[in-house]
């Protein structure tokens, strides 16, 4: 019998507040607790979880035919609110087994900078509750670009819980194609330590690689949401902005053309009237959702980023 087992993550949470027109961030680093668990998963454009490369999976797992889907990660984050600067590291840890579970070895580190001299974010929009969205250009070629659209959604009823969904997008001749999806289920757990404390065990949640995906019927119907928007289509606009509350509006979501993911998550990419909309959503409770959407013009330029707290209307 083949057992599906996930290796787990140790992430971080950013609590962001507006203070004197700047982002005020209490930036924290996740420590570990063997009684709790977390996950980071990579999915195909169709929502199928990828297994970890064979060369990083312990031989014991291969012998037992255990499938490993989840990267164990840590994400130390730090901000300088007066200068509107932040940075974080995504630290991937090699999977461990048995008595090795109390130790950890780094596989790779991906460091991102927001603002300042080392800035490498194309656009960043934030909300006072800690939610944000970022556009990263991770590769530029003569004929195409590779973008990562990072959507961070904080649970409205639990400020220490958040999800991050990253859409990997290839843009060629102003056409968008989904390449992959990364999902991070994260929990605030302790003070910033710059990744100095590594552990092979993690916290609170169970693995979800092979758990049931969201059912399309749960998000189909008429939804009402209060949206907040950051505008980027004007070259004079700053690339780091706070979301501005916009208006309440109704929308119909038919449940089709969605990539349905575990943990009540979904994402989509669609064209409409020459624009491309890249959206993610989290059904955090029955009839209640948070969404984040990046809208691009017909020439592949970012127009706006919007986030919305939505409620399903009776049918």
Image (spheres, grey):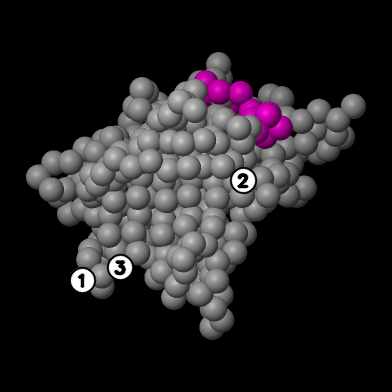
Q: Is residue 241 magenta?
A: no
Residue at the top extreme, as displayed: 35
Q: Give residue 252's position: percent from left, percent from top.
A: 48, 42
Residue at the left extreme, as displayed: 20
Q: Which residues are magenta?
A: 201-213
Q: Place residue 156 in its image quadrant.
A: top left
Q: Secondary structure at mark 1?
A: loop
The residue that label 3 is drawn on is 233
Q: Residue at x 68, y 49 (%)?
A: 46
Q: Residue at x 61, y 36 (%)?
A: 216
Q: Place residue 239 in its image quadrant.
A: bottom left
Q: Secondary structure at mark 2?
A: loop
Query: Is 20 in front, or is 286?
Result: 286
Q: Residues at badges 3 and 2 in contact (C-beta under 8 Å)? A: no
Is residue 119 rendered to the left or right of residue 93? Answer: left
The residue that label 2 is drawn on is 256
Query: Is 227 in front, or is 94?
Result: 227
Is residue 190 rendered to the left or right of residue 117? Answer: right
Q: Residue at x 25, y 70 (%)?
A: 234
Q: Residues at badges 1 and 2 in contact (C-beta under 8 Å)? A: no
* Precedes in sequence: disc 3 or disc 2: 3
How far is mark 3 from mark 2, CA to CA?
Answer: 29 Å
Q: Give residue 179's position: percent from left, percent from top.
A: 62, 59
- Mark 2 nearby-residue class (10 Å; few <14, some 14–19, many ≥20): few
Q: Secondary structure at mark 3?
A: loop
Q: Give residue 8's position: percent from left, percent from top.
A: 60, 32
The residue that label 1 is drawn on is 236
Q: Residues at badges 3 and 1 in contact (C-beta under 8 Å)? A: no
Is residue 183 rendered to the left or right of residue 233? Answer: right
């Amino acid at each position: 019998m083949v057992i599906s087992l996930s290796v787990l993550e140790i992430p971080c949470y950013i609590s962001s507040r507006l203070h004197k027109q700047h982002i005020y961030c209490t930036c924290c680093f996740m420590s570990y607790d063997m009684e709790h668990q977390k996950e980071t998963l990579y999915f195909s454009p169709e929502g199928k979880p990828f297994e970890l490369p064979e060369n990083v999976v312990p031989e014991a797992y291969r012998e037992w035919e255990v499938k490993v889907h989840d990267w164990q990660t840590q994400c130390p984050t730090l901000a300088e609110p007066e200068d509107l600067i932040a940075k974080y590291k995504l630290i991937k840890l090699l999977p461990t087994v048995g008595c090795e579970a109390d130790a950890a070895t780094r596989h790779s580190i991906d460091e991102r900078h927001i603002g300042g001299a080392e800035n490498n974010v194309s656009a960043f929009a934030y909300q006072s509750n800690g939610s944000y969205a970022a556009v990263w250009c991770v590769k530029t070629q003569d004929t195409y670009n590779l973008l990562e659209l990072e959507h961070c959604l904080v649970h409205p009823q639990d400020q220490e819980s958040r999800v991050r969904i990253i859409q990997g997008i290839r843009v060629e001749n102003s056409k968008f194609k989904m390449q992959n999806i990364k999902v991070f289920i994260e929990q605030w757990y302790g003070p910033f330590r710059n990744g100095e404390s590594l552990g092979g065990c993690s916290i609170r949640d169970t693995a979800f690689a092979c758990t049931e995906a969201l059912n399309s019927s749960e998000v189909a119907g008429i939804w009402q949401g209060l949206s907040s928007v950051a505008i980027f289509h004007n070259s004079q606009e700053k690339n780091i902005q706070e979301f501005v509350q916009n208006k309440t509006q109704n929308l119909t979501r038919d449940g089709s053309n969605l990539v349905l993911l575990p943990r009540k998550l979904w994402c989509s990419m669609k064209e409409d009237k020459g624009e491309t909309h890249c959206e993610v959503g989290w059904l955090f409770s029955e009839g209640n959702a948070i969404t984040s959407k990046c809208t691009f013009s017909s020439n592949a330029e970012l127009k706006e980023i919007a986030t919305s707290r939505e409620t399903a209307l009776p049918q």
